[in-house]
Image (spheres, grey):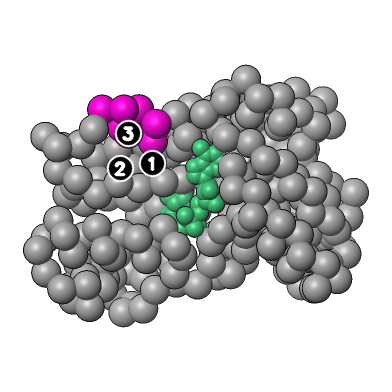
Amino acid sequence: MTMNPGPAPHSLASTRSVGLDLAGRTALVTGAASGIGRACALRLAAAGAKVRAVDRETDGLDMLVGRALEMSVPGSVEPLVLDLTELDAAEAAAAGTDILVNNAGLQLVRPIEQFPPDVFRTVLTVMLEAPFRLIRGALPHMYGQGWGRIVNISSVHGLRASAYKSAYVAAKHGLEGLSKTAALEGAPHGVTSNCVNPGYVRTPLVEKQIADQAAAHDIPQDRVVTDILLKDSALKRLIEPEEVAEAVAYLCTPHASFMTGMSLALDGGWTAH
Ligand code: NAD
């Protein structure tokens, strides 16, 4: 029996290399003032998108806008100061976006019996409930036009647990489920939803963890990277934020239009164990 594979999407058939042209697209990136979010905002703006850069840190957003101007990106970066625990405002901010990058996050490294319940709740709110509300706010426009891209910055900790990270691991595992559900519901409407799962990325979030882990394990900070952070990684280096942003950009290309409900591990071989 011969299978008819059907026509390739027009944009794919006419594109010879993996390119990304987001002119006319609006992207919302949360946690855009720092680290991975900042790199994603700049990458999407470099591809021509109008980027709504959401964060609670005004100074970091100002620096991001300055960097985009220095780079003369063809798109634009529009800062929006917002604390994502304000869930109604978060949902409203997502209206009209074509691409949603759920990236904002925070970490506290502490054994469960010492983990403050209010911090646990905040981590779940920012890293799971806010993404749900942002997706909820973005979908009507995406469904209306028959195209949308949701990229959830999960983690190797969406796929594996580590001691002392109960809230973070719980939130990321929840985000994986939310992302897959959005993929199933979005498929008939041209909307894909995927996770990107980095190992340890060189950002302020990790720099803070090195100090916290040193205290939790009672070892010097210089041993934290080699003995703890990269213990399960086959590749013995931190990833750069720009490498994560490139994976996010790839998921927005026509070449990735059949990828949905998946988790793209950039973990140096950690989950190969
Ligand atoms: P980062 O600390 O450099 O940046 C996180 C940003 O989120 C900050 O700008 C912060 O202000 C913002 N944010 C936090 N709480 C917020 C809130 N309530 N409202 C609005 N903004 C808020 O961190 P990063 O390393 O770039 O991490 C970004 C994402 O990548 C997170 O979801 C994190 O879990 C994930 N991640 C990071 C690593 C890593 O090694 N750095 C690895 C895997 C996954």
Distance between mark 2 and mark 1 Cα atoms: 5 Å
**What residue does disc 3 label?**
119
Q: Please give the range of residues in magenta.
A: 117-124
Distance between mark 1 and mark 3 Cα atoms: 15 Å
Determine the residue positioned at 76% across, 65% down: 66
Distance between mark 2 and mark 3 Cα atoms: 13 Å
Type of secondary structure dominating the magenta stretch: helix
Label 3 crowd bin: few (<14), some (14–19), many (20+), radius 10 Å: some
Image depth: mark 2 or mark 3 in front? 3
Answer yes or no: disc 1 within 8 Å of ligand 1: yes
**Mark 2 residue type:** Val
Element carrying mark 2: helix
Nearer-the-camera pick, 265 or 229: 229
| Tag of residue 169 | 2
Determine the residue positioned at 26% across, 64% down: 211
- Is residue 123 shown in magenta? yes
Q: Is residue 264 visible?
A: no
Determine the residue positioned at 28% across, 65% down: 210
